[in-house]
């Protein structure tokens, strides 16, 4: 019993290659290359997009010189970052210092493997995908804690401790909101969660459960922004107070890995929001037959990419609009507002299910 | 997992070797934080072993509770409390002797128990859907002969009590500034 | 110490903030969204490329200049008020006497190198004879370029 991808490419290789183990290995390599391409490609695109969105929000133009409207600016920046010398500060624990960026990269890559980009475009279909995503999110916290400690810098340690406390707190409401979706769709597999939203646009979970679906979506935005350590919840790397937080002492490739993890996390969290609330790869059917048939012709992964980029744009607008709360305000928001409302939301969800108030 | 048992064995020995190596490193490394890191790798290796036995849920729980929860809190407490690098702990001879005796005794008992079962050469075949999320949930929340709803609720009340107690301990008294 | 609040007042404030908080966030978001979808509001100039068309704002202070008509005549009376107003002595007025024996402007010496472009001289001039122009490409590799004589003709 070999895990298999029901994709034309995978089936072709399985039929051509004589040994099933060899076919599995080739398919695994293809999947790894695909995931890496998505990860690195999206990171480069997203850094450019972030700079452009930030610039336009602030009445600026952003990078304009290299290529058309500065398209190649991030490529150049990445190359510069990769060719920099890598060194650890004196007194740093070298082993943990270089291990931390690798630990922090594991969770986004694992999450990316479980995202269904299309009905047959997914590396790993797991019946426990949502709990597994919640589980591997812990590695992000671990990487931040270890990286901050190993830098032998007070700013780094403070940033790491703050970031760790924040992420542990917000992981609770993040997990509870995902479990809300599990409760609604009756499955923890992302494929089945997507399939449960089939139909027109009103069948997506954000609209399907009246009012509380939208409330859950907004709360998911808040808690995932905190989980991503992005502004307005970038307590871990608040520049004005902590210079750079946990990655103050990192440079070159190691810093690039932190940066990469941040942006892949942005992709995976947006993808998770799309799968759980916005219908995944399903086209947004609006009930008019002509438009619906035209929309259905577009492949699922294109809809998925469009929705993911919309979500990323929403995250970016949030980042460049709102101001950063203090650490105690942040904790108040989680423990005194988000968590009680979350528990009420789950109870209300149970009521909605039992009375059949779902559209 | 694989149709050819050779690959399954290969994977098992690789993972088991990694677990053993990291477990040894946990106790030999001088730095507490480094041993925590090795502990995590060892836990993840155990999760991979569970996955090879098709116990996906247990593997997920292993990652979530041990690697994601327990060790992170351990790292947190190490960062908050200890002065790393200032003191290096030394192991005294009598303690080492006691630890040696205990581990040898444990190893002996385990091998004795394992050798009792003569046919135990490979993983026990699992029944269909034995570890799926649905079946576990059905068992946990079911009433009747195969249901565990009463223990489940009692455990949840226990957890609630723990939560309330920890808040009571942590909160300031009225007079305290 | 924080003021003591009753639990009822605390709860009232809590629920009030649950309403006002999102409203204020939405107000902020509406501002940024307006800017995001209005490319005309962008203020960045692509400087070396649009050198020909670049128009500075009227408030911009470049270097100092005398207001002259088309014949190069100015209205400066060499009173020296600007010289005294200048906080770092960047201005020297060298007066001469004209044929009628009246004190007129000989040379208006202006040292751009020490000028902070504070525009106090312009504000102090009682005759409106000087202004800050809008040149901003002032850099040079030769310090002599910063010692300027502003008037082309002597005063009358």
Image: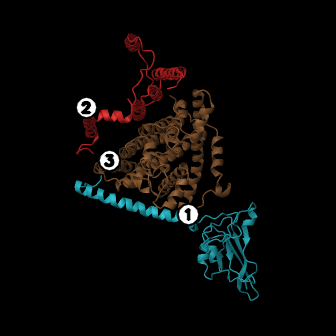
Chain colours: A brown, B red, C cyan
| Dots 1 and 2 on the same chain | no
Q: CA distance from mark 3 to mark 2?
A: 22 Å
A164 to B39, vertically: above or below: below
State left or right for residue C148 relative to residue C127.
right
Label 1 vs label 2, nearer the camera: 2
B86 to A208, vertically: above or below: above
Decide which of A222, A244 is in the foreground and name it: A222
Q: Are marks 3 and 1 in contact (CB under 8 Å)?
A: no
A283 to C90, vertically: above or below: above
C144 to A133, vertically: above or below: below
| Dots 3 and 2 on the same chain | no
Residue B82 appears in the picture as rendered: no
Residue A47 appears in the picture as rendered: yes
| Dot 3 alpha-carbon crowd within 10 angstroms: few under 14, some 14 to 19, many 20 or more | many
Give the chain letter at badge 1: A
Name the secondary structure under disc 3: helix
Q: CA distance from mark 1 to mark 2?
A: 60 Å
Q: Position of residue B82 (x, y in %)?
A: 41, 31
The residue shown at (27%, 45%) is: B177
Q: Are marks 1 and 2 in contact (CB under 8 Å)?
A: no
Residue identified by numbered label 1: A59
| Dot 2 alpha-carbon crowd within 10 angstroms: few under 14, some 14 to 19, many 20 or more | few
Residue identified by numbered label 3: A346
| Dot 1 alpha-carbon crowd within 10 angstroms: few under 14, some 14 to 19, many 20 or more | some
Label ID, residue A143: none
Which of disc 1 and disc 3 is earlier in sequence? 1
Q: Position of residue A332 (x, y in %)?
A: 34, 49
For residue C4, what is the image quadrant? bottom left
Label ID, residue B151: 2
Q: CA distance from mark 3 to mark 1?
A: 41 Å
Give the chain letter at badge 3: A
Name the secondary structure under disc 2: helix
């Amino acid at each position: 019993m070999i895990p298999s991808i029901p994709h034309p490419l995978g089936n072709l290789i399985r039929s051509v290659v004589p040994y099933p183990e060899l076919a599995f290995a080739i398919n695994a390599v293809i999947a790894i290359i695909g995931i890496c391409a998505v990860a690195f490609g999206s990171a480069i695109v997203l850094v450019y997009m972030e700079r452009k969105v930030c610039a336009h929000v602030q009445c600026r133009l952003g990078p304009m010189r290299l290529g058309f409207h500065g398209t190649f600016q991030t490529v150049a920046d990445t190359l510069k970052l990769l060719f920099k010398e890598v060194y650890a500060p004196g007194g740093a624990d070298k082993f943990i210092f270089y291990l931390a960026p690798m630990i922090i990269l594991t969770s986004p890559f694992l999450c990316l493997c479980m995202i269904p980009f299309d009905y047959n475009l997914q590396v790993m279909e797991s019946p426990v995908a949502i709990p597994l995503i919640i589980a591997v999110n812990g590695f992000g916290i671990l990487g931040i804690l270890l990286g901050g400690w190993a830098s032998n810098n007070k700013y780094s340690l403070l940033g790491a401790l703050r970031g760790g406390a924040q992420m542990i707190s917000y992981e609770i409401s993040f997990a509870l909101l995902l479990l809300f979706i599990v409760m609604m769709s009756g499955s923890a597999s992302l494929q089945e969660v997507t399939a449960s939203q089939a139909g027109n646009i009103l069948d997506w979970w954000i609209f399907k459960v009246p009012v509380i679906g939208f409330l859950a979506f907004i709360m998911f935005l808040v808690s995932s922004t905190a989980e991503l350590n992005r502004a307005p919840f970038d307590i871990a790397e608040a520049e004005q107070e902590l210079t750079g937080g946990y990655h103050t002492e990192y440079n070159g490739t190691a810093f690039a890995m932190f940066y990469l993890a941040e942006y892949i996390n942005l992709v995976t969290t947006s993808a998770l929001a799309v799968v759980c609330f916005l219908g995944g790869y399903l086209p947004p059917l609006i009930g008019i037959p002509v438009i619906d048939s035209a929309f259905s012709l577009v492949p699922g992964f294109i809809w998925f990419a469009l929705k993911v980029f919309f979500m990323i744009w929403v995250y970016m607008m949030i980042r460049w609009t709102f101001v950063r709360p203090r650490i105690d305000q942040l904790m108040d928001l989680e423990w005194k507002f988000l968590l009680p409302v979350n528990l009420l939301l789950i109870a209300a969800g149970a009521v909605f299910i039992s009375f059949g108030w779902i559209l | 997992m694989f149709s050819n048992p050779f690959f399954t064995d290969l994977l098992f020995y690789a993972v088991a070797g990694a677990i053993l190596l990291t477990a040894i490193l946990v106790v030999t490394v001088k730095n507490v934080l480094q041993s925590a890191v090795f502990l995590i790798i060892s836990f993840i290796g155990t999760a991979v072993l569970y996955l090879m036995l098709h116990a996906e849920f247990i593997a997920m729980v292993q990652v979530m509770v041990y690697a994601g929860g327990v060790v992170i809190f351990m790292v947190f407490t190490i960062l908050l409390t200890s002065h790393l690098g200032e003191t290096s702990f030394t192991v005294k001879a009598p303690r080492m002797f006691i630890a040696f005796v205990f581990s040898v005794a444990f190893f002996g008992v385990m091998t004795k128990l394992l050798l009792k079962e003569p046919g135990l050469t490979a993983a026990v075949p699992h029944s269909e859907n034995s570890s799926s999320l649905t079946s576990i949930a059905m068992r946990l929340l079911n009433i009747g002969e195969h249901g565990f709803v009463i223990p489940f609720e009692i455990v949840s009340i226990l957890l609630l009590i723990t939560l309330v107690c920890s808040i009571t301990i942590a909160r300031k008294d009225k007079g305290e500034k | 110490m924080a003021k003591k609040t009753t639990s009822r007042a605390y709860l009232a404030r809590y629920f009030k903030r649950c309403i006002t908080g999102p409203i204020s966030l939405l107000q902020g978001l509406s501002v940024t969204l307006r800017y995001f979808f209005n490319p005309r509001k962008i203020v960045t100039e692509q400087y070396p490329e649009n050198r020909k068309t670049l128009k500075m704002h009227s408030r911009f202070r470049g270097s100092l200049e005398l207001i002259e008509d088309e014949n190069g005549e100015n209205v400066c009376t060499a009173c020296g008020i600007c010289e005294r107003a200048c906080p770092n002595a960047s201005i020297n007025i060298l007066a001469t006497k004209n044929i009628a024996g009246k004190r007129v402007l000989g040379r208006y010496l202006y040292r751009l190198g020490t000028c902070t472009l504070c525009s106090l001289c312009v504000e102090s001039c009682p005759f409106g004879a000087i202004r800050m122009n809008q040149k901003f490409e002032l850099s040079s590799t030769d310090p002599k370029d910063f010692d300027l004589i502003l008037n082309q003709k002597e005063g009358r």
